[in-house]
Amino acid sequence: GAVVSQHPSRVICKSGTSVKIECRSLDFQATTMFWYRQFPKQSLMLMATSNEGSKATYEQGVEKDKFLINHASLTLSTLTVTSAHPEDSSFYICSAREQGVRLTEAFFGQGTRLTVV
Amino acid sequence: EDKVVQSPLSLVVHEGDTVTLNCSYEVTNFRSLLWYKQEKKAPTFLFMLTSSGIEKKSGRLSSILDKKELFSILNITATQTGDSAVYLCAVRDNQGGKLIFGQGTELSVKP
């Protein structure tokens, strides 16, 4: 099946620094990737939809200047958490849909656990 | 506002029991409903349902969708300790294809 690789799986950073998370589709082309955030004991909340070659679409309440998304190619999207604060500590997960294929499941990356100290 | 509601939020059963997990939704532009199993990390795909009344089955798991009443159920028969996980229900909308997740049901299967 389709594989989505997310890196890193775990990161600890100091408050005020920036962290970049990569999401790659390994064996298919993904025109659309989605970024989710999951707090402990809660469900996945969509942060933004990333479209290759265009600006990301952010959900209400998500600061686009804080969570920078770049989708420069059909196989790579990145999420950069800028000036991270402890409240940004969470589990970040990306998912990707295969280009030109309708009615498919979304394939998830392994997730990145971010801890800001 | 689109929403997906799962019940119960948590459930404790013993091995061999059968469980039914519920998912109801209010989504303006419904395309499909998906079930995922989440253990420690990212969700793993279980089922995708698009048509009413057609049961999908995989081993001890099965699921069905009712688009008239706007709900789906996930059944697990003869539960095993390895079934312990959070089960997530998500609805894909028809515009952009984003997934709207429910809160999840945390299932714990005791030996």
Image (cartoon, rainbow, N blue to C red):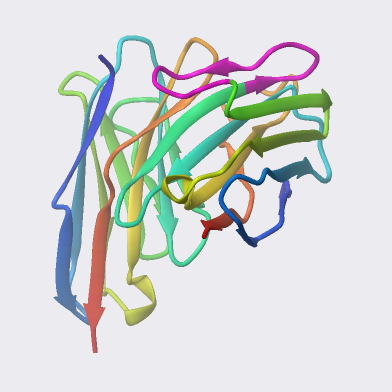
Q: Residue at x 72, y 30 (%)?
A: A98
x, y percent for residue A94: 60, 41
Residue, far bottom? B111
The reply to whether residue A102 is visible in this rendering is no
Task: Please say if B86 is above or below B74.
Answer: below
The question of residue A56 being in magenta is answered with yes
Horizontally, residue A79 falls left or right of residue A35, namely: right
Of A76 and B54, the residue lying toward us: A76
Residue lying at 17% horizontally and 53% vertically, measured from the top left: B9
Magenta region: which residues?
Answer: A50-64
**Residue A65 appears in which quarter of the rendering?**
top right
Quadrant where the image shows the C terminus of chain B: bottom left
Give yes or no for residue B85 being in the magenta stretch: no
* Relative to B19, A77 lies left or right: right
Residue at screen point 50% across, 45% down: A85
Taking A12 as reference, is A26 above or below it?
above
The residue under the point 32% across, 79% down is B80
Q: Is residue A12 visible from the viewing direction of this image?
A: yes
Residue B54's quadrant in the figure? top left
Q: Main secondary structure of the magenta part?
A: loop
B83 and A8: which is toward the camera: A8
Percent across and percent down for residue A76 are 80, 35
Q: Tell me if residue A95 comes above or below residue A32 in the rendering.
A: below
Toward the front, the furthest residue is A16
In percent of width and height, residue B87 lies at 33, 54
Q: How many marks?
A: 0
* Quarter of the N terminus of chain B within the rendering: top left
* Residue A83 horizontal/vertical position (percent): 60, 39
Which of these two is toward me, A57 or B22? A57
